[in-house]
Amino acid sequence: QVQLVESGGGSVQAGGSLRLSCAASRYTVSSTCMGWFRQIPGKEREGVAGIDKNAATSYADSVKGRFTISRDNAKNTLYLQMNSLNSEDTGMYYCAAAWPWRCVVGSLKSADFGYWGQGTQVTVSS
């Protein structure tokens, strides 16, 4: 059973930074596509950032220049560094991994990811 466990969420003031982590079990983070998504109650889940097996990255326009997705292959962990946070970044953040046989390069669509973590809450106050 693949497990993805997020951590690092919390409350921060606007302009601040947070670093989210996603520890993977029974799954190799460098083997296929992985991504970060966020969701606000009442809204659809939104793709924030993605990284493929060649470490190519993709970002939603709303976070470009502020967020950085990366991974540590030795620790089998995915990260999301979030800087210059604003209130619109508030939401539940989820780590996701694509099925090993399916990696849609550059995709930030939920349907392209088969494994999900439980989420970590990020709250940005102005």
Image (cartoon, rainbow, N blue to C red):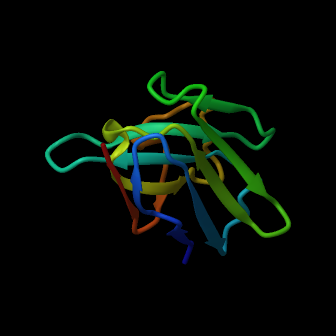
Q: For this view, does 87 lie left or right of residue 26?
A: left
Q: For this view, does 105 lie left or right of residue 42?
A: right
Residue closest to the eye, 113 or 58: 58
Residue 34 in percent (x, y) is at: 61, 49
Q: Give the residue at the far right of this rendering.
A: 74
Q: Is residue 48 above or below residue 22?
A: above
Q: Give the residue at the far top of this rendering.
A: 61
Residue 40 in percent (x, y) is at: 24, 47
Q: Is residue 4 above or below residue 12?
A: below
Q: Quadrant of the N terminus?
A: bottom right
Residue 19 in percent (x, y) is at: 59, 56
Quarter-of-image position of residue 24 = bottom right
Q: Residue at x 44, y 56 (%)?
A: 94
**Numbered marks: total:** 0
Q: For this view, does 61 lie left or right of residue 102?
A: left
Q: Residue at x 79, y 59 (%)?
A: 72
Q: Residue at x 40, y 64 (%)?
A: 119
Residue closest to the eye, 13 or 121: 13
Asked if residue 31 can be seen in this view, the reply is no
Residue closest to the eye, 94 or 31: 94
Q: Residue at x 20, y 41 (%)?
A: 43
Asked if residue 13 can be seen in this view, the reply is yes
Residue closest to the eye, 101 or 81: 81
Q: Quadrant of the C terminus?
A: top left
Q: Give the residue at the far left of this rendering.
A: 42
